[in-house]
Image: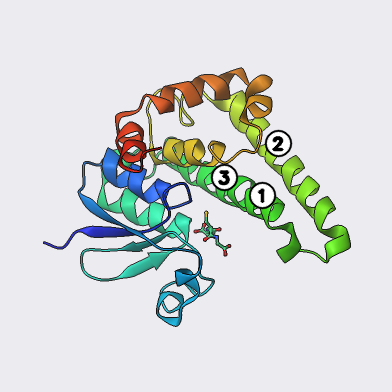
Amino acid sequence: MNKYVVIGRPRAGSLIAEFLLSAANVEYEFKNISIDEAQQEDFKRMSPFSKIPVLVCPDGQTIFETVAIVIHLVEKFPQLAPQSSTSERNSLWQYLALIQTAVYAGYHRQFYSHRYAPKDAAEEVGMLAAQDREVAYSYINANLNPYVLGKNKSAVDYYLYMVTRWDPNINQLLSNKGNLESFVALMKEDEAVRKVLLSHNL
Ligand SMILES: N[C@@H](CCC(=O)N[C@@H](CS)C(=O)NCC(=O)O)C(=O)O
């Protein structure tokens, strides 16, 4: 049978697909793509904005957009999430959406502010994005126990851990968020996380 292929870059958003496949004990191949290569037409046919991650499924279908990739993997590997039609499952999707829109997109708006606003307003756009992120992280911190959905680890924990890794000042982020600090420490010890990071020498 063909393997899943994760197209991405070691430190970037493709980590979520790798973490989840690894947590589900599924063998996959990692294909590194540079920012320049992602601009090529053949990659744009898979991902129109040249963004990673892209997940190539064993049947050849390609999926872009993190949320779609997470949903696909949760459906394929149910051990990554609470059962359907439970309150925990509703929370899973809620946190997935929150992290996607306020945190992940927030880092992008801050690090690439010039793409979101004219030069003279770009810095402010970045600051506003950082403020939104702080609201989201504070809410998440208040509800972590010790994982996002409570005592059971799920797909969204890998997503949260991945985005915290991108913070420009992780010490400051964690300084007033004790639960998030403990969560990050727990996730660093997670077997799937360690395996994936080690595979990239991170
Ligand atoms: N909405 C996309 C965002 C993906 C994204 O921003 N990926 C970054 C890497 S973490 C990227 O490809 N950046 C290159 C660029 O913006 O040109 C998703 O959730 O998959």
Which of the colour schemes (rainbow, by chain, secondary structure, one colour) is used? Answer: rainbow
Residue 196, quarter of the rendered image: top left
Q: Which residue is under mark 1?
A: 106
Question: Which numbered circle lies on residue 152?
Answer: none
Q: Secondary structure at mark 1?
A: helix
Tell me residue 114's x, y (percent): 75, 62
First of labels 2, 3 by sequence position: 3
Query: Residue furthest toward the right?
Result: 120
| Quadrant placement of the N terminus | bottom left
Name above or below for residue 88 compared with residue 188: below
Q: Residue at x 73, y 43 (%)?
A: 130
Residue 46 vs 197, above or below: the answer is below
Name the N-terminal-most of marks 2 and 1: 1
Q: Where is residue 77? Give x, y as percent.
A: 26, 47
**Residue named by callout 3:** 99
Q: Residues within 10 Å of mark 1 (few under 14, many from 20)?
A: many
Frontmost residue, 188 versus 89: 188
Q: Is residue 113 left or right of residue 29?
A: right
Q: Judging from the image, what secondary structure is the residue with disc 2 in?
A: helix
Tell me if mark 3 has few (under 14), some (14-19) or many (20+) residues whose alpha carbon lies within 10 angstroms of its own: many
Pointer 2 residue: 134
Amino acid type at circle 1 is Gly
Residue drawn at (41%, 63%) of the image: 33
Q: CA distance from mark 2 to mark 3?
A: 11 Å
- Mark 3 belongs to which amino acid? Ile
Vertically, is 28 above or below 46?
A: above
Secondary structure, mark 3, is helix
The CA distance from mark 2 to mark 1 is: 10 Å
Numbered disc in front, either 3 or 1 = 1
Q: CA distance from mark 3 to mark 1?
A: 9 Å
